[in-house]
Image (spheres, rainbow, N blue to C red):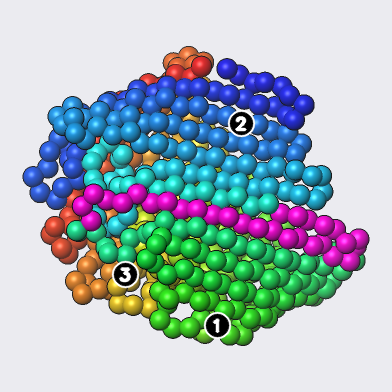
Amino acid sequence: MGAISAQAGQWRVIPSLEVAETYTDNVELSPVNQKSDFITRISPGINVTAKGARLNLNVNYVANFLIFARDNENTDLRHNLNAGLTTELVKDWLFLDGRASINQQFLDRGGSISASDANVTDNRQTVQTYTISPTIRRRLGSFADMRLGYYFGYVKAGKPENPVFLPVDLLQDTVSHSVNWGLDSGKRFARIRWGTSIDYRHEQRAKGFPSSEDLYYRFYGEYSVNRWLTLLGSAGYEDIKDRTLTQNRDGFVWDVGVRLTPGPRTEVSLRGGRRYNDTNWNMQGVYRLSERTAFNFSYSEEVTTSSRVLQQQLAIDRNIAAIDPGGFSLTEGAFLRKRAQVGFTGSRKRNVFGANLFHEKRTSDTAFNQETSYGVDANFTRSLSRAASAFVSGTYRHSTYDQAEHRQDDFYSAQAGVNYKLSEYLSGGVTYYYTNRDSNQILRKLEENAVKLSVKATF
């Protein structure tokens, strides 16, 4: 339908229709007695974008209708929505940010999983995540900038029909309310910067599950010693009330650190202190080789929940990337999350590439659901011509579960394919998927090969 000019900005509405045929040699993702099948997927969709001086909107919705040739009972309709909105409702005063996601995710990391979506498993369920956040911003001359915000989040997770072989603490529907106030130093303060904030968060879980509250006061300061060295520090008080935690997480919190900017391409910050009644470290940095190529690394420690992680993903990734099939289980209750990662992204002439290494440990206060995982992701895309491109990607995960069974898994997945633009409004492609999980428990092993042919038209 193309672009529509309006006083508020440029609007673009693009309907689409994709038809795909997939062959898989393990349609039920079973460790034994694998069954093959052909799956036809019919996917009507629509993409709406709007850009203006005070508006940025992107909505992408696709309805995937899957028809299984050998078993009509597996026929399924799967909704997918990626949406983001940022707007300035009242100039220089009231702002609104919203995010929405509907997709299919694997509830249990140890259950049936795959890099392809053309298969059947009770472990895959529709997960809906919505957030909306109005914020008032006010500049108090050159002295300070003030903000007052409200945050609403909602996570709804589908439930398996037969949860016998899945964890008993699967993620429950969660409603989050948060109020935050902050005051940051203004232009008057150049060498010494300061700020203070108060954050209150309430999470209401499904009936029968305990809710949680988090109150956090913080004052921070920065002192620029010179162009490349800045001293950092903060102090405050935090009180976390969550009955899924058997140990209290409240008391005085503090940290000190440095931020290094030895050149225009490099920035590194390191903080160490005490939080959650224990030593706490945070680190992040970036090194830009060029405008298109950069290294980044980070390390963080936080008490959080699966629901909060899902909401954070919407805020960090405006495009709402596809869910990693080798990720962590979606569980109920709070846990201590320690994550380190190193990433590399870039482009050069016809090539786009990236890689990410990570190590993450999630520890709850109970013996159930202790997970540690490390691995690597890599991807490479090459433009073969104006009409054709080829891509390949791969994932490796090693996961351990500190439970009674002491399970260890090695997960591998790979994708490779070619896309071709047949005309301005018509494109096609072929993709090969490979999934393999090796485990010290034989019933956790699985393997799948799948090939997909697709044609997509836009109108």
Task: Give the CA distance from mark 1 to mark 3.
Answer: 23 Å
Which amino acid type is marked by label 1? Asp
Which amino acid type is marked by label 2? Thr
Which amino acid type is marked by label 3? Asn
Name the residue rendered at 44%, 62% in the picture. 205
Can residue 172 be seen here? Answer: yes
Where disc 1 sits, the SS reads: strand
**Mark 1 or mark 3: which comes first in sequence?**
1
Magenta stretch bounds: 135-163
**Mark 2 or mark 1: which comes first in sequence?**
2
Place of residue 342 in the rendered image (x, y in percent of width and height, measured from the top left): 49, 60
Residue 227, disc: none
Q: Residues within 10 Å of mark 2 (few under 14, many from 20)?
A: some
Q: Is residue 230 magenta?
A: no
Residue 369, disc: 3
Of 224 and 174, which appears nearest the observer?
A: 174
Where disc 3 sits, the SS reads: loop
User: Overall secondary structure of the magenta stretch?
Assistant: strand
Task: Give the CA distance from mark 2 to mark 1.
Answer: 44 Å
Q: In this rendering, would 453 be left or right of 381?
A: left
Can residue 345 be seen here? Answer: no
Find the residue positioned furthest to the top: 423
Residue 250, disc: 1
Q: Is residue 124 above or below residue 118?
A: below
Mark in front: 2 vs 1: 1
Place of residue 355 in the rendered image (x, y in percent of width and height, measured from the top left): 45, 51
Q: Is residue 145 magenta?
A: yes
Provide the residue designation for mark 2: 49
